[in-house]
Amino acid sequence: MTSGQVGVRWQGDLWAGHFDAMASSCEILLALPFEQAELAGRLVRLAANEVWRIEQRYSRYRPDNLFAALHNRPGQAQRVDAETARLLNFADQAWRLSSGRFDVTSGLLRRVWTFDGSDRLPDDDAIKALLPLIGWQRVTWLSGTVDSSGEVAGGSLTLPEGMELDFGGIGKEYAADRALGICMKAIPSRWRQSGMLVNLGGDLACNGPRAPEQPWRVGVESPYEDDQPPLMLELWRGGLATSGDSRRYLLRNGKRYSHLLDPNTGWPIEQAPRSVTVAAPSCIQSGLVASLAMLQGASATEYLKNIGLPHWVISE
């Protein structure tokens, strides 16, 4: 399926929509009757359009979007809109909670790291050359005021020369929540209790069970390469996200290098689990906690126990 195309079909006892976005195969499942084909198609297209909108705004690979404009004016204070301000506030909070390990300026490290399963490690000098351009503490971020409804009224951002933003760690999870919210607002009231699930390449958000007393059954891919069956979980409401190295890693002299990089050193986090899955009230919360746990390395399980959210850890 090419970009911009949406497929909708009856699948068993629900409607399923499919499209591609954010380098992932995406799916919208709607527990609507067979007779509601028109409604199902409309909801799937609304969800897909919202995901594509977010991808267009915040993709680091586009030369013509919001990020490109911000990066083209280094050293200048720039006003950002309310949506971007909310995401930057979230990124700021994540940076503080992780003691600087979750950093939306660390995407520059992709210039030297390519996690393609090979044994090619970057030169240490090349990594060190990028470190002065990484660090949220170097960015000047002034959040706008918050109104009575909790809405952030924009803000002011100043990026130093050579630094970039990268929402890769939160963008897909945010899009999943937004797509679900769009569907929930658009669905007629008589169908509002119908189960809906958004799946953006394994990042999930749902409004409730697919039917009374019938949760969504979802599979979490095994990080191992010996055809182990997926971990099957029941999702009743909220978000589910997984962070792991099943697809993005390097392997050299028997040592596996995860794609999760420490922005302070430029090197992969040591002794991280192979996979962490977290359930939370929203997908963006699930994804953040899963990533923060992975960034704890050997202390991931202890960290998750202290957080108290349902979680599943797969280690070596």
Image: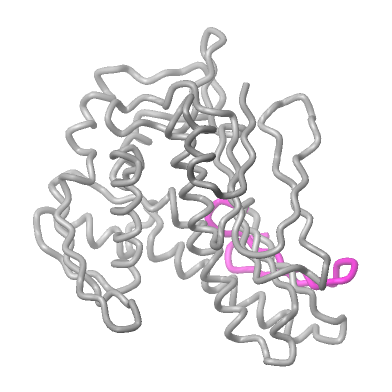
Inspect the magenta stretch and tell me whether residue 17 lies in it.
Answer: yes
Q: In front: 111, or 230?
A: 230
Judge left or right: residue 213 versus residue 193. Answer: right
Residue 83 in the image: state x and y as whole percent: 35, 71
Residue farthest to the right, as pictured:
12
Quadrant of the frame with the C terminus:
top right
Q: Residue at x 28, y 53 (%)?
A: 92
Judge left or right: residue 138 versus residue 230. Answer: left
Residue 97 in the image: state x and y as whole percent: 34, 46
Up-down: is 160 above or below 69? above
Inspect the magenta stretch and tell me whether residue 23 lies in it.
Answer: yes
Q: Quadrant of residue 26?
A: bottom right
Q: Quadrant of residue 230?
A: top right
Quadrant of the frame with the N terminus:
bottom right
Up-down: is 166 above or below 195? above
Residue 303 in the image: state x and y as whole percent: 47, 37
* Display colour scheme: one colour
Q: In front: 81, or 304?
A: 304
Residue 60 in the image: state x and y as whole percent: 37, 52
Up-down: is 13 above or below 169? below
Q: In front: 24, or 198?
A: 198
Judge left or right: residue 213 versus residue 82. Answer: right
Q: Residue at x 44, y 33 (%)?
A: 260
Residue farthest to the top, as pictured:
253
Q: Residue at x 72, y 26 (%)?
A: 225
Q: Residue at x 68, y 92 (%)?
A: 189
The residue range painted magenta reads 1-24
How many numbered circles are shown?
0
